[in-house]
Amino acid sequence: MTAGLPTTASLGVVAGSVILGVLAGSAAPVLARRFVAVTGVHGPLGQAGVPPRFAGCFVLPTGAHRLPMSPAAVPRWPVPALAGAVVFAGLAVARGDDPGLPVFLLVAAIGLVLAVVDLICLRLPDLLVAAAAGGGVLGLGVVALATGTPARFPMMAAGTAVSLAVYLTLAVLPRSRLGFGDVKLAAALGPALGWAGWSALGWGLALPHVLAGVTALVLLATHRVRPDTPLPFGPAILCATWLALLA
């Protein structure tokens, strides 16, 4: 912890973060539409009852579309705005004395867009993942140099390496449902978890599977999905990272 910084987030920081979170959450669905694919559709638009905004999201080798969830389940305002407010407020309260807070908020804003895209069509666009990774590494690197804490660099590198190794191993296991987009996202969030310490890294690696498992069980119990329905894993990784940073 840097000397001279407050031990708790001020009301001004929290209030400002909430406002930024509302704006980021409100913009997430708008920005996500730019990353919902317009290519890759096999067959005429609307085939198999697919709504136009889902066209190109996900296509089976046979050309039949599959959707991760019903169109009604796609988050709409004010849900994303509220989610952004909660995410940003939580980071401000938990990390208000951390000079890396602005970087965490930046990565969180990108994460909101990634979550919406993945919920819509099971994709984690490389451009957004790269933006999250670049923002985290460059932002936290600048903060480490500015605050005279170069010891953060090995932890950031360790967070990236461990996250990549764990998710890559899980992704290549037989019958694994993890995609390489999930692997890249986990690695992109590794620097933030490494910055926060080994405990945060451990929680950030373990919690996604708990969250995804509980969500799948609830959806199955309520007959919202079938056992073979593909579900997005990116939101679980993002949510787990957020929770780990709050600890």
Image (tube, rainbow, N blue to C red):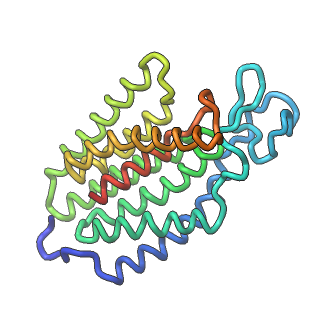
Spot the residue most to the front. 221
Residue 160 lies, in percent from the top left, at 30, 39
Q: In this picture, is 40 found above or below 141?
A: above
Residue 234 lies, in percent from the top left, at 49, 42
Task: Locate residue 202 relative to residue 119 in the image: left or right.
Answer: left
Q: Residue at x 25, y 61 (%)?
A: 143
The one of 145 and 123 positioned closer to us in this rendering: 123
Q: In this picture, is 66 found above or below 112?
A: above
Count the marks: 0
The one of 237 and 148 positioned closer to us in this rendering: 237
Q: In this picture, is 156 found above or below 181?
A: below
Spot the residue most to the top. 174
Task: Locate residue 97 relative to residue 67 in the image: left or right.
Answer: left
Spot the residue most to the left. 3
Q: Residue at x 73, y 37 (%)?
A: 56
Q: Residue at x 54, y 41 (%)?
A: 124
Q: Residue at x 62, y 68 (%)?
A: 78
Task: Locate residue 247 relative to residue 112 in the image: left or right.
Answer: left
- In the picture, which quadrant includes the C terminus? bottom left
Q: Quadrant of residue 163?
A: top left
Q: Quadrant of residue 229?
A: top right
Residue 109 lies, in percent from the top left, at 48, 60
Q: In this picture, is 48 found above or below 98?
A: above
The one of 223 and 35 positioned closer to us in this rendering: 223
Residue 92 lies, in percent from the top left, at 34, 70
- In the picture, which quadrant includes the N terminus? bottom left
